[in-house]
Amino acid sequence: MSYQTIETQLAPGVALIWLNRPDVRNAMNDTMIAELTDAFEAAIDDDAIRAIVLAGKGKAFCAGGDLNWMKRAGEMSPEEAFEDSRKLARLLRTIHDSPKPVIARVHGAAFAGGMGLVAACDIAVGSHEAKFCLSEVKLGLVPAMISPFVVGRIGAAHARRWTLTAEVFGAAEAWRIGLLDDISPDDELDGTINALLGHLVQASPAALHEAKRLIRDVAGKPIDDALTDDTARRIAAMRASPDGQEGMAAFFEKRKPSWFIDPENA
């Protein structure tokens, strides 16, 4: 499919989704939000895709919301503005709830909504030069739609600091607070991500999906009988599943499982 504001590429087992408005540092507008949602839904529905990478063309990952779009939104009726905001919420949830792992490839600025995109991904890898900012309060706004993902990623205490001060911070701080999982020099960023993808495409697609659900469902829960019973049911179901049976058979037969993609020969 042809897009106006994004670009998509396919590699064996991987969908790469590029924000492609480099002249405005990949600032999001309504068209980009709709196109990103469509591209993610297409990648999720494609059985050949095991993992998704979100990246930005040009000098920045994403500068946040396009101010011209935000100005138009400010002139909408309350009902129109609500529906418009829900479109960004849908995009963020589509990324966050994807059954397939999503990696953010972050370079340059990831401000406001751009930081929200990073927080919604499963794994985030940034260059040493990456910069982050929750700049909304300096514009008289709040990071409302992205807040569940940002707080979920870095915790309430860190979210308070960076939301209230709207300071710019670098990759090292982003790693310290948990926004980034890895930091690489610019010229090694793709190599770091490719190494991660090499692991992801060798895993069972069904197990990856269930592992994401497991982490989401047990996070913050008390370790009690209900939780241990739930986890026991989950592993019992996975052992009996087609992928569980195939994985165990492949292990004992000393062969690769049927879902295996060799990144060296792909």
Image (cartoon, rainbow, N blue to C red):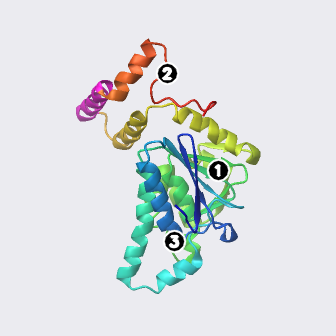
Q: Is residue 7 left or right of residue 80?
A: right
Query: From what the image shows, is residue 218 above or below residue 3?
Result: above
Taking depth in this image into account, of 225 and 130 the one nearest to the observer is 130
Taking depth in this image into account, of 140 and 55 the one nearest to the observer is 55
Q: Mark 2 is on which residue type?
A: Lys
Q: Mark 1 is on which residue type?
A: Glu
| Residue occupied by mark 2 | 256
What segment is highlighted magenta in the picture?
224-240
Mark 1 / mark 3, whichever is N-terminal: 3
Q: Position of residue 49 (x, y in %)?
A: 48, 43
* Residue 147 seen by the camera: no
Q: Residue at x 49, y 17 (%)?
A: 255
Dot 3: what SS?
helix
* Other-residue count near label 2 (Cα within 10 Å), few / some / many at <14 / 14–19 / ≥20: some
Dot 2: what SS?
loop
* Other-residue count near label 1 (Cα within 10 Å), few / some / many at <14 / 14–19 / ≥20: few
| Residue occupied by mark 1 | 173
| Mark toward the viewer: 2 or 3 | 2
Q: Position of residue 160 (x, y in %)?
A: 51, 60
Q: Residue at x 54, y 78 (%)?
A: 69
Q: Mark 3 is on which residue type?
A: Thr
- 225 in the magenta segment: yes
| Residue occupied by mark 3 | 31
Q: Main secondary structure of the magenta part?
A: helix
